[in-house]
Amino acid sequence: MSDKSTITRRSALTLLGAGATAIAMPMIIRPRPAWAANGVINVTTYDKFLPKEFVEKFERDSGIEVRIRLTDDQGKQYNLLTAEGANPSTDIVTVAGHRYSQFISSKLIQPLDTAKIPNWKNLNTAYQDAPWARVDDKLWGLPILAGYEGLARNVDYVKDAPSWQIMFDPEYKGLTSYIVSDFMTIAMQMLGHDGDFVTYVDKADIAQKATNEARDLLIKHKDMVRKYYDAGSEVQQMFINEDIYLAHSWSGPAAKLIMEGHPIELSVPKEGTFGFCYTLNVVNNAPNAENAYKLLNAILESPEVGAAMTRQSGYSSTINGVADLLNDREKLASTLPQEQLDRIIFFSSVNRDMKNQMIDRATAEVKAA
């Protein structure tokens, strides 16, 4: 995904004529476009998250111009807000649940006032007051899309995959791929350790030993890997080209392949996995906070918005009634059997610094080995 910031907006009407022409002709006064009547709202989010049709309808209905800045990285959003300090240029940012602590402790986002969101009742009850979303006894964002790390496989070549161990099966040597840092925590989980580091608070020695064990496993089986990838588009292309048959993948990229008819299946193996929600968060000192709440409320107004988000991003919507609007292939791509859903552990904000430091170091060691 390009790192270039993109802003979408309607073109403003301009007054024609200048100088002598303006004197010779009467001035034509044109009405301001509807979207310009009630101000603006600036949103930093990922590509395909806010459907174009929804944004255009919201502008018409509310008279608020929506300016979207695209991002492809949590760190970039954090760094931008930190640099802007008390005078942010954006009103809403898109934060992954496990990054809450970083944004909250830096006072970059504000607690969410659900009283300003009458349509909050349309949010699935699993997300209305989820434990991972509540920090310091406050809610901090509107969950819009849920994702998880899954085992993706080409069903033409891999019929079943009940365990993450299949990623190390010699039959698929050179036909697997993963993001090293993300798969590292899955490997820890597979080995019986805590891949989210929640139980390792004040237990650095135990955490390091567990991390090293997963690191050594990945180094031992480096020859299994066709390529370490970074972006979802990379793993999609490898599956399309049949360069790989198996991959650790975030649900979004894999789901898009399924929706497009490719022979891919996504599952949660018996050892479990990790999940998260993308949330829309109102920025601290947001210049257009009231407009921000209007947008959040509009998102929850209709399940059609959630369905469009799912179709575009591949991630599962958090809004009630979306499943009824999806076709069979879309449901296959964005839903899981209950027993697999029960294996998903939502990322915690606890002990993130230790986790990031140890995983980052181990990732570098795997790549250098």
Image (tube, rainbow, N blue to C red):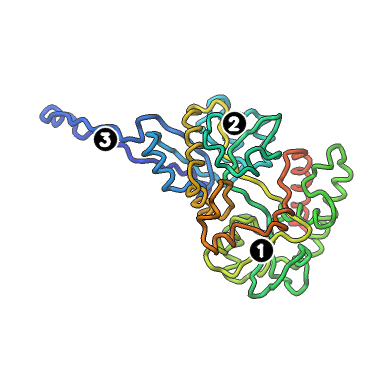
Q: Earlier in the sequence, mark 3 or mark 1?
A: 3
The CA span between labels 2 and 3 is 38 Å
Q: Secondary structure at mark 1?
A: strand
Position of residue 25 measured from the top left corner of the image (x, y, whole percent): 12, 30
Residue 41 or 272: which is nearer the viewer?
272
Q: Residues within 10 Å of mark 3 (few under 14, many from 20)?
A: few
Which one is in front, 326 or 5?
326
Name the residue beneath numbered marker 2. 112
* Tag 3: amino acid: Thr
Quadrant in the rendering for residue 121: top right
Residue type, label 1: Ala
Closest to the camera, between mark 2 and mark 3, is 2
Residue assigned mark 1: 152
In this rendering, the answer to whether 209 lies above or below 18 is: below
Query: In 3D space, how far apart are the residues under numbered discs 3 and 1 (Cα atoms)?
Result: 52 Å
The Cα–Cα distance between marks 2 and 1, rounded to whole angstroms, is: 35 Å
* Residue on which the image places disc 3: 14
Pointer 3 and pointer 1: residues touching (CB < 8 Å)?
Answer: no
- Which label's residue is closer to the chain start, 2 or 3? 3
Decide which of tag 2 and tag 1 comes sooner along the chain. Answer: 2
Discs 2/1, front: 2
Residue sitting at x 47%, y 39%: 298
Q: Which residue shows up at 43% across the image and 38% down it?
A: 66
SS class, disc 3: loop
